[in-house]
Image (cartoon, rainbow, N blue to C red):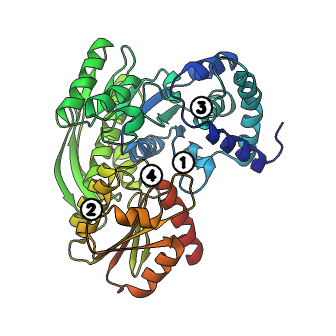
Amino acid sequence: MVVTYKEAIDWIHSRLRLGMKPGLKRMEWMMERLAHPEQHIKTIHVAGTNGKGSTVCYLRTILQEAGYNIGTFTSPYIEQFNERISINGVPIHDEEIVSLVNEIKPLAEQLEHTELGSPTEFEVITAMALVYFAKTKQVDLVIFETGLGGRLDSTNVIDPLFSIITNIGFDHTAILGETVEEIAYEKSGIIKPDSPVITSVEQEEALQVILAKAQSTNSQVYQYNLDFTIANYQSTKSGESFSIKTPFLTINDLNSKMKGAHQVKNAALAIMAAVYLKTHFSMTIEEVHIRDGIKNAFWAGRFESLMAEPMVIIDGAHNPEGVQALCKTLNDHFNDKKIHIIFSALADKHIGDMLNPLADIAERLTCTSFDFPRSLSARELYDQCSRSNKDYEEDWKVVINEKLNSIPKDDVLIITGSLYFISEVRLHILGCLS
């Protein structure tokens, strides 16, 4: 039995040594012995390479504006571990973590002695979330974000009202596949029989995989740019402005403070989901709730401004698609500014496809490293960038302090890469400002 929060977190993180073990057998084993908590909650399932967290945030905020209590299960965390399991954006309490660990830990120890083997960290956390929302805290709806892929992800034990697939990109290719078709196959694994799917996937090859899966499961598909569309889109000083047309509702002049064209797509997914809930599940969601939800949504670490002079922005662009979106957002909002970039990433990424586009828009690109098992050294990153406007510094705190003291106040400093890196940077900078 664990007594303290630290003991609980240490035990959870001890599961990291088991790595990733795709498959649902261990989850199914635990669900049976926990009296199937996944069957006692209403859920929405969200998969995709990028944009899952932002889409969850938009949808949660819309539903909160409508007066509903909404649970979320997301990863990774930015500020604290507890935020992975939240209600209305408020993380689970420390003592609730302790209680859940004491419920799941004996099962994990039993499971370890079966032919299935020990559950992973993510499987443990998923089980904790399911128990929490089914037994501890009653909510109106829970939005579950997949951890990796979808088909074999531990969250795929749920039977959602419907699913959302944000996009398809090249991340975790060693596990999910080397082609968009293979990756789409894994993501589309969350589509359940007779359960609709809402998607913003646009690559034809990936879309065909999703459509085939939907047809085989008799699932209605709502496609971005076909069934729901964006119009009158423009970047503004404070964010993005757009209108949306869905099969059930058209709303003009929406405003989001989450910057980037990619965030407009994420918002569109959330709006389509909210309208579907209103139309097919009789949830009381009015236009004002959607409008206010989009306006008030905030997701830490996604093009988040931490300082004004010089402007310091952190963004978890942790794969090529994320970098592409970041570069477009910078061109849309800061094409008249000099941009300095600090970057750090993990070893399982397509590094060259990330570094070179960043260097192309930067006055200077500085590679750095941070204390994490799979983190690349600054020199390793530096060597994989083919551009000349680059340098490196192994200590990320040193390079951030140096940049803050040297760049002109009118310039922009972007700190990007791994979300684990962004989490540490955010705490450091906000701590220095407080």
> Can the viewer see residue 434?
no
Residue 234 lies, in percent from the top left, at: 19, 58
In the figure, is residue 386 to the left or right of 85?
Answer: left
Q: Which mark is residue 123?
A: 3
Q: Earlier in the sequence, mark 3 or mark 1?
A: 1
Numbered disc in front, either 3 or 1: 3
- Occupied quadrant, residue 324: bottom left
Label 2: which secondary element: helix
> Can the viewer see residue 220?
yes
Mark 2 = which residue? Answer: 356
Circle 2 residues within 10 Å: few <14, some 14–19, many ≥20: some
Mark 1 = which residue? Answer: 89
* 60, 279: nearer the viewer: 60
Position of residue 51 relative to residue 131, above or below, is: below
Residue 261 lies, in percent from the top left, at: 25, 53
Q: Residue at horizontal 23%, vertical 59%?
A: 328
Q: Residue at horizontal 78%, vertical 46%?
A: 7
- Occupied quadrant, residue 191: top left
Q: Amino acid at mark 1?
A: Gly
Circle 3 residues within 10 Å: few <14, some 14–19, many ≥20: many
Label 1: which secondary element: loop
Q: Amino acid at mark 2?
A: Asn
Residue 72 lies, in percent from the top left, at: 52, 39
Q: Residue at horizontal 30%, vertical 59%?
A: 326
CA distance separating discs 4 and 1: 31 Å
Q: Kindly indicate whether the residue at mark 1 contacts the one at mark 3 (C-beta within 8 angstroms).
A: no
* 113, 283: nearer the viewer: 113
Q: Amino acid at mark 3?
A: Glu
Q: Earlier in the sequence, mark 4 or mark 1?
A: 1
